[in-house]
Image (cartoon, rainbow, N blue to C red):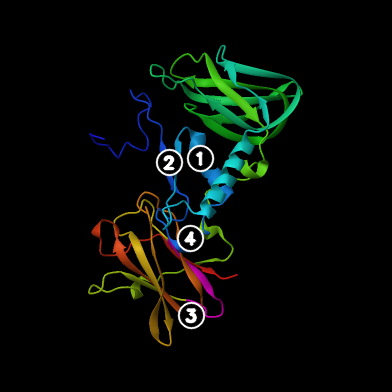
Amino acid sequence: MPGFCNTGEANSGHKDGVFFIPGDCDVPFRPGWFYHTREDNAQKSVQHLINIYLRSAGSGAYMNLGMTPDKRGLIHENDVKRLKEFKAALDSLFANKVFGDEVKIENNVGTVEFGGTKRLNFIKMAEFLSSTQGELVSGYEVDVRKGGKWETVLKGQAIGLKRLKPIPTQDCDAVRIRITESSGTVKSLKFSGYLAPEHLIGVGTAIQENDIRSLPNYRKLEVNPASQFTPMHPLRYLEFPVSRDKAISGFVFTPAAGAPLGTPDRCTVEIQQDGKWVKAADREFSNVKSNPVPQLIPLDNVKTDRIRIRADRFLDGAEEMVFGEMGILLAD
């Protein structure tokens, strides 16, 4: 595409801009963007994929799920299986519809009467957008009526292309949406509610990205900078003492926030055996610049008293390693 992109504004845009350009959320289906046989069973979980969907498509963006063909030129059968499971989970979010679709807005309020008590926990909203009509809503609240009294269960700002919002499970006889701020008159909205599986939408719990560091077998490694490098030897290795008592199933490299200059995108893990350093594994950190999340280097349940990570290649040709955190996964 001809032209250029102002990357400083690409992630925010302009509230009153001329063009409507939805966000584009790219995420790999496996740990990285490229095919590796060792990752044939490393697909993201269904729950992880649903979390990503709610935070991307559920916020008016497009979720681009990065798939890669295997050495046969085919999508691996394990990937196909997980995609089908993901599709089934997505369908279940909208299988039990309680109310909707379009609600008329009068005096900035749209109300849906149920004619009896119904249960819901998931709200879907969207504005009617066109080539001549962009987003209008910049503030809204959703209320439910219980026992003749209104209770606010959701507050937000933009609605735009789509908003998917879990709410605490409610037994109520009416629901309404109130427009608290807008750049023009809102005449109607797409507004519907569902009773979705609670374990998928995180009712009662925070919806978060899976983070390897939250696993119970994760151990953070403490870095002693004074022992890592000298002016004659730039920081390309990080060495750590570990306990030989427990086997190690993985090394976790967490980039510094924003993946600054000096972030490696290819690393080797070595362990000390009989006084010599031996290669245990290596890994390419695919798309780490755009997606600086913890990177796992799987290990074959090794036992050692010293372990080190070596930066084999840096982003933007840097010479010294920059990082946020290092850790290991202990074998079960």
Between residue 184 and residue 86, name the one nearer to us.
Answer: 86
Task: Tell me which numbered mark, 1 or 2, is placed earlier along the sequence.
Answer: 2
Secondary structure beneath label 4: helix
Q: Which residue is at a point 59% across and 63% down the rendered structure image?
A: 216
Q: Residue furthest top?
A: 106
Residue 132 appears anywhere in the view? yes
- Three-letter amino acid code of the residue under disc 2: Cys
Task: Give percent across and percent down for residue 131.
Answer: 38, 19
Mark 4 or 3: in front is 4
Dot 3 corresponds to which residue? Answer: 304
Sequence-first tag of 3 and 1: 1
Label 3 close to label 2 by CB (< 8 Å)? no
Distance between mark 1 and mark 2 Cα atoms? 9 Å
Tag 4 residue? 39
Q: Earlier in the sequence, mark 3 or mark 2?
A: 2
Which amino acid lies under the numbered mark 3 shown in the image of this protein?
Thr
Q: Disc 3 and disc 1: Cα gap in Å?
A: 40 Å
Question: Which residue, given by chain and number where applicable, does mark 1 sit on?
Answer: 55
- The quadrant of the picture occupied by the C terminus is bottom right
Q: x, y percentage for residue 243?
A: 52, 78
SS at mark 2 in the image: strand
Dot 4 or dot 3: first in sequence order is 4
Residue 258, percent from left and from top: 36, 51
The vertical placement of 104 against 137, above or below, is: above
